[in-house]
Amino acid sequence: MDVAEQLRPLSTATLQRRTARLEQAGPPHNDPRQPVSKDEALSAAVRAYLSHPREERRLSGVPLPSWLCEQLLAELRTLHWPPCSHRPALDSEAYLILTIKKGGTLTSGFGTQHPLHRLRLLCSDVLAVADPDFIPSAVAVTKNLVGSPHIDHFDRSYQLAVSLGDFKGGELCIDEESADPESSDVSPEQDAKPWHRVAVVETRNRVAKVDGRYVHWVRPHSGGDRFSIIFYNTSADPAHPLGPAVHPLSIPVTRLEIWNSLSSSI
């Protein structure tokens, strides 16, 4: 994907800061130059990024129970998607948002006869396996979303990301440097430029804990449809502090054993 498209979601101030940082190969600082237009700042940043390519850090989410992935995939393949995308600014074949009433759950108000009851129930299972303490305000369900670098500006916490399908590629990519021009965002890791890299996260049949307040996008895929399920929160008060672009996620072995054992009874 074009570097310009990956950088476009950033503000002019952030683009200037990143360009100066790369050109000087030093720590972040306040850029003393006069204000420029967004297009000028973007062009300068692209040149700097082409001269100093970002590193890639490959990661994988935590595997979900196979029976849960199979049932979710079957449900998504037969889903009657809305005729119009619920988020048309992103490039996808279909985009559905499952809203959650404040204080409710994914299935609150959606009885067994509701066409989305089964999908909501399975999404609740994913949440119970991955992070039962996380309270999403909505769940985004997509079909064949690709590219679309963006920042989820209204998020107030981390996200849980899952993808499903018989496809190759389609990794979730996250720019690991903060989009906040005031943030130093220096990782404690000892890499040469830990702030100048992209996390490439495998989420197929897995769940990853990421932060949508960083620029992120999806790589192209082939071989079959790619479905994704994103749990997010836009109402947490106070907001969850901005942490790393990709959070560690550890699911207790006992919890996984319990959920894996359910396959024999379903």
Image (spheres, grey):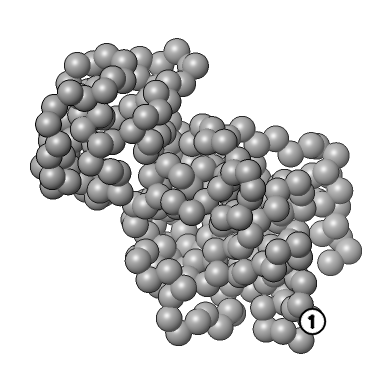
x, y percentage for residue 217?
A: 38, 50
Residue 230 location (% of width, % of height)? 56, 57
Query: Is residue 163 visible in this depiction of the protein?
Result: yes
The residue lying at 26 percent from left, 29 percent from top is 18
Q: Is residue 152 left or right of residue 103?
A: left
Q: Is residue 215 above or below residue 140?
A: above
Q: Which of 170 and 181 is in front in this view?
A: 181
Q: Which residue is drawn at 30% across and 44% down?
A: 10
- Neighbourhood count class around disc 1 (C-alpha, 10 Å): few under 14, some 14–19, many 20 upward: few
Which residue does the image show at 82% across and 52% down from the upper left? 259
Residue 66 shows in this picture = no
Which residue shows up at 21% across the image and 25% down it?
31
**Vertical side of 23 occupied by 13: above or below:** below
Give left or right: position of 183 versus 98.
Answer: left
| Near-viewer residue (185 or 121) | 185
Q: In which quarter of the image is residue 121?
A: bottom right
Q: For the residue labelled by badge 1, is the local secondary structure a helix, a strand or a loop?
A: loop
**Could you tell whether 19 is left or right of 164 in the image?**
left
Residue in front for this viewpoint, 257 or 245: 245
Quarter of the figure with residue 248: top right
Q: Residue 8, position in %: x, y?
A: 25, 48
Q: In this view, does 31 lie above or below 13?
A: above
Asked whether 208 or 159 is in front, the reply is 159
Which residue was labeled with disc 1?
A: 112
